[in-house]
Image: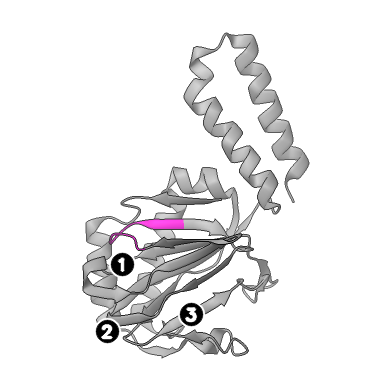
Amino acid sequence: MFLQIENFLTVAEVKAISDLSLQAKFIDGRRSNPHNMTKHNVIGEPTDAAAQQAAQIALAALQRNEAARDFAFPQRIAIPVLTRYDTGMTYGAHIDAAFLPVAERPMRSDVSCTMFVSDPAAYQGGELVVYLGSEEVRIKGQAGHAVFYASTAVHGVAPVTSGERLVMIAFIESQIPDPAQRDLLYSLNEVRAAEGLKMDWRSRTRLEYVSSNLQRMWSR
């Protein structure tokens, strides 16, 4: 399951990240995953001031967005990474690393997020491709839009045939590691939000009882 959120970044935030990308120092994207031969992009140097400012803008958006919190049940969020695909760059089908070497202990990646910064008209190709069984879902979001998906999903980025694709990439450790359980809780809570006030108090309380206790049972 994946979630798309429109206007996840404001117009001002998109412009700020775009401007910072012109100042930022970029390095080979394989620096963060040297064993993946299909990865061909560039990422903001972690110690670069402009890249760090862009990361903080994206992090603030992740922390304030209620829909993202409801979907991901975040426990820890890795610092987002400014990522660019120039003409000819791509990222083959892959699964994100299970653990990221952040802070004092590794962070498990449960939910991945792509925040689109470039106008989709500014580049050709470059779709985020999520493989669902024998099907491919191709996503090319508007500037400021974001998509969330399980880090266990096979996905990639189609080759950019012209222009430049700029995105912010983030990884989330969820309170609910199992994607099937996370999906069930998300769906249950969406029903509660949409229908709860239409129910009598007994039914609404029973629904809250199930949701809250499942979250207690499944959280890690």
Characterize the local packing of mark 2: few (<14), some (14-19) or many (20 or more) Cα atoms within 10 angstroms.
few
- Give the residue number, with chain letter if any, for mark 3: 91
Q: Quadrant of residue 38?
A: bottom right
Graded by Cα atoms within 10 Å as few (under 14), some (14 to 19) or many (20 or more), the crowding at tag 3 reads many
Question: Is residue 119 at all visible to an observer of this figure?
Answer: no
Q: Residue at x 48, y 62 (%)?
A: 113
Magenta part mainly helix, strand or loop?
loop
Q: What amino acid does circle 1 point to?
A: Val
Q: Quote the CA–CA distance across marks 2 and 1.
A: 15 Å
Residue 143: say if magenta: yes
Q: Is residue 59 left or right of residue 98?
A: left
Choose mark 3 or mark 2, whichever is in front: 3
Q: Residue 201 location in percent, x, y?
A: 59, 10
The magenta region covers: 140-147
Judging by the rendered image, the residue that carries numbered circle 2 is 23
Q: How is the image coloured?
A: one colour
Going by the picture, which residue comes out furthest to the right?
217
Instruction: Give me the residue at 68% from left, 47% from top.
Output: 180
Where residue 125 appears, x then y in whole percent?
Answer: 33, 74
Q: Which label belongs to residue 158?
A: none
Q: Nearer the viewer, residue 60 or 72?
A: 72
Give SS at disc 3.
Answer: strand
Count all numbered tags in the image, as a single digit: 3
Q: Amino acid at mark 3?
A: Tyr
Mark toward the viewer: 2 or 1: 1
The correct choice, above or below, for 73 with respect to 143 in the image is above
User: Which mark, residue 117?
Assistant: 1
Indicate the secondary structure of the residue bearing disc 1: loop
